[in-house]
Image (tube, helix red, strand yellow):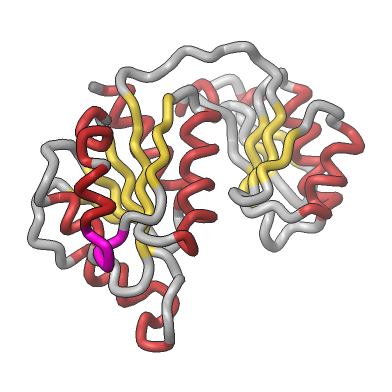
Amino acid sequence: MNMKLSYEDLGFAKIDHHRKQRKGFPEVVYCEGKTPEQVAKIAQRIARQKHDVLATRADRKAFQAVKKILKNAKYHELARIIIVKKTNDRRLATGDICIITAGTADIPVAEEAAVTAEFLGNKVERIYDVGVAGIHRLIRNLPTIKKAKVVIVVAGMEGALPSVVGGLIDKPIIAVPTSVGYGASFKGLSALLTMMNSCAPGIGVVNIDNGFGAAVLAHYILKCA
């Protein structure tokens, strides 16, 4: 490995510029716990390598700091994502990703997945608020869901929706538990355990509120198909 490409040491961060060669896309910036100035400096150095920038869990202060030095930065507020496009590579992965939510309150996590998947070059279909409390809403959208190559199902509360979808379609499902729910949902733990204990085959589960992780996994599934 060319050590010059391995990483750039900023003192507070070591930026992995070589990651695009290994993984297919540059290092992603996780903004929570970082100051706006740290986020901006990391984004600037990634962009300097002519790489696209994706920064997750970003607030407006972080975006404003990035925008000052990277004028073409865009902020997806619901997803809490900052994007800076440095390339024109818009090659689509094979097939589509369908992202479903049980409720409207799950949309921020779903949008993190959707914006990430689109950043990686995938076509995304969104179907929101089709949870088990009104199962007819899901049934009506099944023809669209079945067209997808990978389905991401985002749900809080008891987290039952992935199991229902898993019993109706023959596509890989990535289940995302959210921290939406009352006290006994234990900030997403109830949904997580429900999804991990699903009797429907073909379901994989990522961590609570991890829309980003779900999108990357879906991207790799499509890439390898």
Res. 213 visible in picture: yes
In this rendering, would 150 be left or right of 35?
A: left
- Which of the 4 image quarters holds residue 34? bottom right
Name which residue lies at 84% across and 30% down. Answer: 70
- Between residues 30 and 73, which one lies in front from this camera angle? 73
Q: Quadrant of the C terminus?
A: top left
Residue 139: percent from the left, percent from the top? Answer: 20, 48
Which residues fall within the magenta stretch? 131-135
- In reply to whether residue 83 is colored magenta, the answer given is no
Name which residue lies at 42% across and 77% down. Answer: 181
Give the farthest residue toward the right: 68
Residue 172: percent from the left, percent from the top? Answer: 20, 39
Q: Main secondary structure of the magenta part?
A: helix
Name which residue lies at 59% across and 36% down. Answer: 27
Q: Examine the rendered structure and indicate whether residue 51 appears above or below residue 190.
A: above
Res. 206 visible in picture: no
Residue 150: percent from the left, percent from the top? Answer: 27, 35
- In reply to whether residue 134 is colored magenta, the answer given is yes
In this rendering, would 34 be left or right of 211?
A: right
- Between residues 95 and 84, which one lies in front from this camera angle? 95
Q: Examine the rendered structure and indicate whether residue 23 appears above or below residue 110.
A: above
In this rendering, would 90 be left or right of 98?
A: right
Q: Examine the rendered structure and indicate whether residue 177 appears above or below residue 121.
A: below
